[in-house]
Image (tube, rainbow, N blue to C red):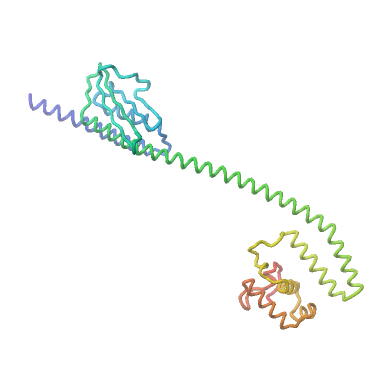
């Protein structure tokens, strides 16, 4: 008889231990859910703890996790006066993160064992850590969503600015071509009558080219390599891009050929063109052979 009682007690202890392990495993699975909230963690933990008690049907579990409270069974009333009670809490600094209160009513035969009290304490610590993690993830999600909204608004604003800039550029270009180009043509015609027609044609071509590039691309940006060139170097490069030889450029600008070669050499260095590689014409945005 004594052996039978001992065996029954041992079997009961094993069953309770198995329920405790099931609770821990189920709690781990619950807290690893990707879309879990703090409220969901509290509700699920209350149910799992009630099922792990010695008298699951008579156990009532209330969990306070941060500012949220969950109870199992749902809508459980206040514990009966004189009922059995056990509690545990986890504290971070001076602030309670998690409180767990477990009760058995007067009609229940359950008693809280040391194992159950230890389980309550362990779950309180686990839930406290999980709550802090979930709150951090919530803040991170909120930050990412806010950043995405701001990026979308910024992209929309930049798109509108680019559209407005394109519209303004188009209007300015149309007005300039309508008013400036005829004046340039008249000046070139006048120059041909009074001077060298070839020089007049070159000047007209250069003015129209500069005007077209300025209207099409706008002013060169701060990183544009062409900004590194001096006025004379830029002038020489423009003439090179127009197809003139060093001799022709020297005659056109009334300078020596050696000076032209020096300007070309300095311009190639500033444009990052290695010796005997690349071309000034290509760097100026014009299709031409190597120079």
Q: Position of residue 205 (x, y in %)?
A: 81, 68
Quarter-wise, where is residue 96 in the image?
top left
User: Along the line of sight, which residue is nearer the eye, 85 or 288?
Assistant: 85
Residue 31 sits in which quadrant?
A: top left
Q: Quadrant of the C terminus?
A: bottom right
Q: Quadrant of residue 89?
A: top left
- In percent of width and height, residue 193 lies at 92, 72
Residue most extreme to the right: 193
Q: Residue at x 88, y 71 (%)?
A: 191
Q: Is residue 250 above or below residue 22?
A: below
Tell me: 131 left or right of 174: left
Left or right for 57, reference 250: left
**Residue nearer the viewer, 93 or 8:** 93
Instruction: Please state if 108 lies on the left or on the right of 185 as rendered.
Output: left
Name the spot of residue 268 as percent of width and height, x first.
65, 74
Q: Which residue is painted at 46% across and 42% down in the image?
A: 140
Q: Residue 224, position in %: x, y? A: 65, 64
Question: Residue drawn at (63%, 78%), measured in percent from left and top?
Answer: 276
Foreground of the two, 183 or 202: 183
């Amino acid at each position: 008889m004594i052996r039978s009682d001992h065996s029954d007690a041992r079997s009961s202890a094993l069953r309770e231990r198995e329920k405790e392990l099931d609770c821990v495993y189920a709690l781990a699975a619950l807290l690893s859910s990707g879309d879990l909230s703090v409220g969901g963690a509290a509700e699920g933990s209350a149910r799992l703890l009630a099922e792990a008690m010695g008298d699951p049907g008579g156990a009532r579990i209330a969990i306070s996790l941060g500012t949220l409270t969950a109870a199992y069974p749902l809508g459980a009333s206040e514990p009966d006066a004189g009922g059995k009670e056990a509690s545990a809490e986890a504290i971070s600094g001076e602030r309670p993160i998690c409180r767990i209160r477990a009760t058995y009513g007067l009609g229940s035969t359950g008693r809280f064992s040391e194992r159950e009290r230890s389980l309550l304490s362990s779950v309180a610590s686990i839930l406290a850590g999980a709550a802090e993690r979930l709150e951090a993830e919530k803040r991170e999600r909120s930050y990412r969503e806010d950043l995405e909204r701001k990026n979308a608004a910024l992209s929309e604003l930049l798109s509108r600015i680019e559209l407005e800039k394109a519209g303004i550029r188009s209007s300015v270009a149309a007005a300039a071509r309508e008013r400036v180009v005829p004046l340039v043509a008249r000046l070139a015609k006048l120059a041909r009558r009074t001077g060298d027609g070839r020089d007049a044609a070159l000047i007209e071509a250069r003015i129209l080219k500069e005007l077209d590039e300025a209207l099409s691309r706008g002013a060169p940006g701060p990183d544009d390599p062409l900004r590194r060139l001096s006025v004379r170097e830029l002038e020489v490069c423009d003439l090179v891009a127009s197809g003139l030889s060093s001799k022709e450029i020297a005659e056109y600008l009334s300078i020596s050929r050696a000076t032209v070669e020096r300007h070309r050499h300095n311009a190639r260095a500033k444009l990052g063109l290695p010796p005997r590689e690349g071309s000034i014409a290509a760097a100026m945005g014009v299709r031409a052979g190597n120079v």
